[in-house]
Amino acid sequence: MRISDNTRFEAMRQSMATSQAQYFKASREASSGVRVGAPSDDPIAAAQALRVQSAMDRTTAYRSSINTVRGDVELAESSLADAKSDLDRAHEIALRAGSGQMNADERKALGIEAAQLKEHLLAVANTKSSQGYLFGGTQTAVAPFSASGTFSGDDLDRNIELANGVVTAVSTSGAKAFTVAGGRDVLGDLDALVTALNSNDQAGVLATVNALDASGRQILAARVDAGLKVAKLEAADTAHEQTGVSLATNQQTLVGSDPAQAYSRLAQAQQGVDQAISVSKNILDTLRSTQI
Amino acid sequence: MAGISNLLGLARDALNAQAFGLNVTGQNVANANTPGYVRRDAVLEARVAGTITYGGVTAAGIHRSVDSFLDERNYVASSFEEGAKSRDQSLGAIENLFNDTAGTGLSGSLDALFTSFSSLGASPSDPTARAVVLQKADEFAGRLRDTSNQIATLRTDLLTQSQGTTSRINQTASQIAKLNGQITLTENTGGDAADLKDQRDKLVTDLSGKINAHVFTDGSGKLVIATGGATLVEGDRAATLAVDTHADGSLQINLQRPGGTVLDITSQITRGSLGGIIEARDDDAVAMSQKLDQFAYDVATAVNTQHAAGYGTDGVNGRNLFAIGGVAGAAATIALDPAMVGHPERLAAASSATSLPGGADNANLLAGVLDKPVTSGNTRTPAEAYSDIVGEIGQRKAASAQDVEVRGAMHAQTKAMRESVSGVSMDEELVSLSSYQRAYQAASKLLQTADELLRTLMGVI
């Protein structure tokens, strides 16, 4: 083929432009650590990376929700622990005051303590958290128990989405823990003890012993339920944390560049530029020697 | 004596012919870098003087080294390359919109909407969590509108660009027609039209970069340029192109021949920068825009359905979160429902009126909607559907970039082939220069010898 001067210059221009473009791409990849900077760099990886990113965002969102409610569930558990010790003490009082060796004054003194225990229990049942009243079910805006112990909440669960499609209850049912919905009216049982103590009614006091025991077990069951919820949230959080780590690794594999490969490509591209320059120089030298 | 006179005549002819050769070589050297210039050869012929053997030389003219087949291949390759480049450029602009690190960040805002629903599920009675949902929903709608508007703006820009390109095509076609007339006139009057033909070839190359041009000479020797089935230039007459839009908003390129009817040739323009513009504007951009509309419609409809099923803290249900019309133009018009603007309490977090205000089942279901296959005919989740859109634009852009490379290489090859016939090689010209120079010197010597012979003869007399 006959080679014109323009063909030679055009070939030089082309090889310089191509090698410079490859060098630019390789240096961008090596310096940024990103192999896929735009969807067209690798459409399949770019689309997959978006889905992975979306999954990572989900994981972060689930963890954030878990952390928002975890404090409340823990508070419910510790509140119920307080309630249980109140009932244990009330049970103890009932046992002591039920014996025949106690006089009216002693029973009255215990009656004052029992009344305080009831007040404390009422305060516990009306515990308020960041999301409103803890034991009112979904009725979080108003105190679920009145001073007389009337329950105005509901027995509906407050749920969060723990993972895709996994919804779990994070509220502890006040109805089941404190009212007849759970078997015993806890505040009513305490009331009965206070009344029996104040009226020095030994038989009445004895009659509350079993009821208070059952109430204590009812509170304990609710506490266990809250504790299990905390454990469940913690397990889910840990699982999400691990998922997040593996998704991040996956993301890096998809769009990130392997440093060793990136630098080797850069060195190769640099060599390409050097070669293009030296070949062009050679062609120009040849032209100069024949024509000048 | 006739012999010496003949010698003088021979020397004169030789000097003229070699000087002509030097002149043509000079033209080649001078135009080595002139775009469109075709290498010329001096055509030297023996001078015929009746039946006598005279032995003189004459410069018969200039030969342009052209191969019309290679020229045509080069025009085609050029129009393919320019078409690919122009489409690639526009696709780059669309790709940028969907590049989540640099674009409008639609994927991020979709994820943020999910996160806000999830947070609302954890804190249904928290006014801040409610306000965040409204803000994220508004932002998501805004990003969709922004992306859709930018595609629309790009289409408007491409319309303007097509008008500019068309006007340059008209200008070039009319110049070619004018040159055709001048070339015919020059050749009919015995002149040499090499320069005019070079100019015309350059203009045809320019034209083929803008539109697919099939160049040929008809039976009567007229140069004809056809685009698709329509004739753009025929001899000294050029048709004009005009840009309009079809009823669906796509580009309509009309061709009007002088005194003829208007012809819609849009479908026949497949190459050249105009072909690239049409493909990017009315195929790529429209496809991406439609996919975005479908995505916006599907997501908004699914969220609205779920939202309407729940109750706001005011105990009212049946409200939409997004205001959206039909599928067409959904991404351009989607907005936060006016009834929801400034009313976070109307967000339907609870699934029943009785579970107010602490119930959050519907908020959880709203988050769940964004993880359900509610898009692309209920086969893909919103995040998947969006990643499909990104994958598709990535694929289109990668394919067009590849096309630019392939077409560029093909054009470089046809250019090199054309150059191998029509290009100037300095080495050759230097050889020609020496050859004509030596011949000229020898002819001078011939003249000198004849002169001396004559002088000697005159001295004898």
Image: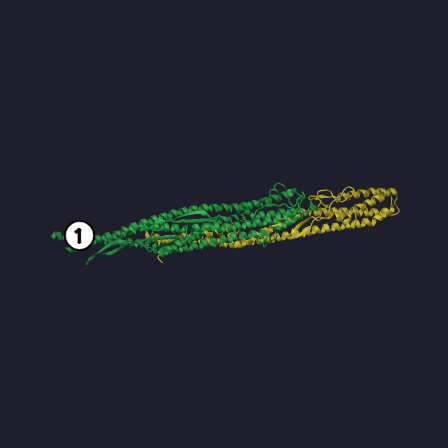
Chain colours: A yellow, B green
- Examine the rendering and report whether any part of residue B30 can be seen: no
SS at mark 1 in the image = helix
- B340 sits to left or right of B19: right
Determine whether B445 is above or below B319 in the image. Answer: below
Farthest left residue in view: B461
> Label 1: how many residues lie within 10 Å, few (<14), some (14-19) or many (20+)?
some
- Give B199 or A131, whichever is nearer the viewer: B199
Query: Where is the N terminus of chain B found, in terms of image quarters?
Result: bottom left
Residue B123 in percent (x, y) is at 66, 45
Q: Amino acid at mark 1?
A: Asp
- Examine the rendering and report whether any part of residue B10 can be seen: yes
- Give B254 or B395, whichever is nearer the viewer: B254
- A292 sits to left or right of B130: left
Residue A42 in percent (x, y) is at 52, 54
- B428 sits to left or right of A223: left
How many numbered callouts?
A: 1
Look at 46% across and 54% down and name the residue there: B403
Residue that badge 1 annotates:
B451
Look at 21% across and 53% down and name the residue there: B11
Residue B426 in percent (x, y) is at 33, 53
- The image quarter containing residue A151 is top right
Chain of the residue displaying label 1 = B
Residue B381 in percent (x, y) is at 59, 52
